[in-house]
Image (cartoon, rainbow, N blue to C red):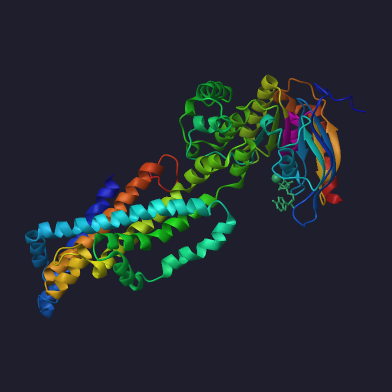
């Protein structure tokens, strides 16, 4: 507990030091405010436009969460299918790699064309971009079960369903969480990137990515900074939420999720 | 020279006749193996590494099929006889996400035993292997010896008539191993199963068995069979008796011969 408090204090000290450095750079190099606003101006922008900012944050959070939830649901189902036979894996696994390597920026216009601008399109982009790590990690977890455990199940005449749901699936949960951790970061990036393209169906109102473009076009650099800051906070929130869920589900039995008792 | 071994029953539990086994197109791992294990008999198999000991257990349990020859367990094919057989692996192979109780219940659960009957069996097994105080613990909270006890309790839960044990105590320190050996004998005197026990330890084999089979390598085949005529019930003090020493040195000698050949 004391350790973690110390970590938090350290982080805050570093943050304060960065703010000071930022202010010094402004004074020394006389940077015009439309290039780099003062920390105070950014704080003021956050304060005066808080409702709009929170609205954008909520939109992007919803899109990322929706995309992530969909990729978890679909990814686990695909992984379950992959775990059934080596043949299926050989045939379809390369395509999941494709999913990972295709630049989403290149596909975004197509999605826009098919789905139309707005939140569904952005959610779809967040889903596509975060799917691959879920599939890859869950499949790995499902098939890397100790052979002796499989033999044990066979000795007691386990059915295919029992093997899957009482052995492979629980065994894959830690790997699934590794996948979710990676995917959660990508989903937020995907949503913000998606918004740059398929941002909003309503001028001036949209998620963080859309608002970043908009603030940029208006040269509202202080608000632009506030938006970037909000994007980072969103990413952090996702990360910590996933970490907490991982801890909650795994700490009783899994080594990796254990909080060290004494250091 | 030796008096006939005292076998409680001469009905065969396992009959292995002329079994040869090779994996894929590889060389024979086992060559024309003949071995009969009687009901309630405890047979140990000992050999240098890689002679096919684990393969024999896998054949008896039907997890792999012989290349030629026949195997019968209670007169049935190994696959059909599975519900009379339990397997104990070298590592405890517990499910880390299940508590001790739920791990012991696994075999019954898989075989579709109703939950109230399962609970009764688990409770009596917990007491039998002395794990009542850790019933709700997860495997990572247990010592190696405790994990092995859970594994044995799980194997006994289905009331098997044949137990296959593949170096179950190899990873344990000598003291835990001796304790568990004594426990195995006690459990067996209560439950009367037959056992095929694979080990690298001559002393362990001598302490537990009615018969010791020594395998020779390349390909795996029976080199010598030693009936064990030590007094029963076997108690810890037996390990320091001259008869015990004599047996151990005879088996060790045979084991060395297999390496020289
Ligand atoms: N699934 C398998 N596929 C191919 N070869 C195998 C397989 N299992 C075992 N073998 C081979 O069969 C031989 C005997 O293996 P086995 O595990 O039965 O020996 P063992 O006597 O149990 O050895 P150890 O004392 O090291 O446990 C070895 O040469 C091994 O490489
Ligand atoms: Mg072996």
Q: Determine if residue B99 is in view.
A: yes
**Residue extent of the magenta highlight:** B195-210
Where is B127 relative to B251, above or below? Answer: above
Q: Is residue B201 magenta?
A: yes
Q: Which residue occupies 54% across, 58% down?
A: A89
Residue A125 position, x and y percent, is 32, 63
Q: Quadrant of residue A229?
A: bottom left
Rendered location of residue A21, percent (x, y): 17, 70
Q: Report the quarter where the N terminus of chain B lies.
A: top right
Q: Is residue B214 left or right of residue A206?
A: right
Q: Closest to the observer: B233 or B92?
A: B92
Residue B65 appears at what percent x and percent y? Answer: 75, 45
The structure residue drawn at horizontal position 68% and vertical position 39%, both measured from the top left corner, is B167
Up-down relation of residue A32 to residue B95 (above or below): below
Q: Indicate whether B149 appears above or below A203.
A: above
A61 to the left or right of B209: left
Q: Is residue A263 visible?
A: no
Is residue A66 rendered magenta in the image? Answer: no
Residue with the most extreme right position: B1
**Count of marks placed on residues:** 0
Along the viewing direction, whichever of A167 and A108 lies nearer the viewer? A108
Residue A182, picture quadrant: bottom left
Q: Residue B106 at what x, y percent from top left?
A: 55, 33
């Amino acid at each position: 507990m004391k350790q973690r408090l110390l970590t938090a204090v350290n982080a805050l000290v570093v943050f304060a030091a960065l703010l000071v450095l930022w202010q010094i750079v402004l004074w020394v190099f006389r940077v015009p405010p439309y290039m780099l606003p003062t920390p105070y101006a950014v704080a003021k922008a956050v304060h005066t436009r808080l409702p709009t900012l929170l609205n954008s944050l909520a939109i992007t959070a919803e899109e990322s969460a929706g995309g992530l939830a969909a990729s978890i649901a679909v990814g686990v189902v695909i992984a379950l299918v992959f775990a059934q036979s080596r043949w299926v894996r050989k045939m379809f696994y390369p395509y999941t790699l494709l999913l990972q390597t295709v630049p989403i920026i290149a596909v975004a216009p197509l999605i826009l064309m098919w789905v139309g601008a707005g939140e569904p399109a952005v959610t779809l982009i967040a889903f596509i971009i975060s799917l691959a790590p879920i599939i890859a990690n869950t499949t790995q977890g499902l098939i890397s079960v100790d052979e002796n455990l499989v033999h044990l199940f066979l000795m007691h005449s386990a059915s295919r369903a029992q093997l899957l749901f009482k052995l492979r699936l629980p065994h894959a949960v830690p790997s699934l969480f590794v996948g979710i951790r990676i995917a959660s970061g990508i989903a937020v990036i995907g949503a913000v990137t998606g918004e740059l393209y398929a941002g909003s169906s309503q001028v001036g109102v949209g998620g963080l990515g859309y608002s970043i473009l908009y603030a940029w076009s208006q040269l509202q650099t202080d608000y632009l900074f506030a938006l970037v800051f909000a994007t980072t906070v969103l990413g952090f929130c996702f990360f910590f939420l996933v970490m907490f869920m991982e801890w909650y589900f795994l700490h009783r039995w899994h080594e990796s999720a254990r909080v060290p008792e004494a250091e | 020279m030796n008096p006939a071994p005292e076998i409680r029953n001469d009905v065969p539990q396992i009959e292995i006749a002329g079994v040869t086994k090779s994996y894929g197109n590889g060389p024979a791992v086992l060559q024309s193996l003949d071995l009969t294990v009687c009901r309630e008999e405890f047979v140990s198999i000992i050999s240098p590494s890689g002679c096919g000991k684990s393969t024999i257990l896998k054949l008896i349990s039907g997890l792999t099929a012989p290349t030629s020859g026949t195997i019968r367990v209670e007169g049935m094919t190994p696959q059909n006889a599975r519900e009379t057989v339990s397997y104990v692996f070298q590592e405890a192979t517990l499910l880390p996400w299940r508590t001790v109780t739920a791990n012991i219940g696994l075999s019954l659960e898989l075989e579709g035993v109703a939950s109230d009957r399962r609970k009764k069996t688990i409770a009596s097994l917990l007491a039998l292997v002395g794990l009542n105080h850790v019933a709700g613990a997860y495997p990572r909270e247990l010592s190696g010896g405790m994990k092995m006890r859970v594994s044995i309790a799980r194997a006994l839960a289905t009331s098997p008539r044949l137990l296959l044990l593949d170096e179950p105590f190899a990873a344990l320190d000598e003291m835990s191993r001796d304790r568990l050996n004594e426990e195995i004998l006690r459990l067996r005197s209560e439950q009367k199963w037959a056992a095929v026990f694979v080990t690298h330890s001559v002393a362990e084999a001598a302490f537990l068995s009615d018969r010791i089979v020594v395998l020779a390598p390349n390909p795996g085949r029976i080199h010598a069979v030693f009936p064990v005529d030590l007094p029963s019930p076997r108690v810890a003090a037996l390990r320091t008796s001259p008869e015990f020493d004599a047996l151990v040195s005879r088996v060790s000698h045979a084991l060395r011969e297999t390496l020289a050949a």
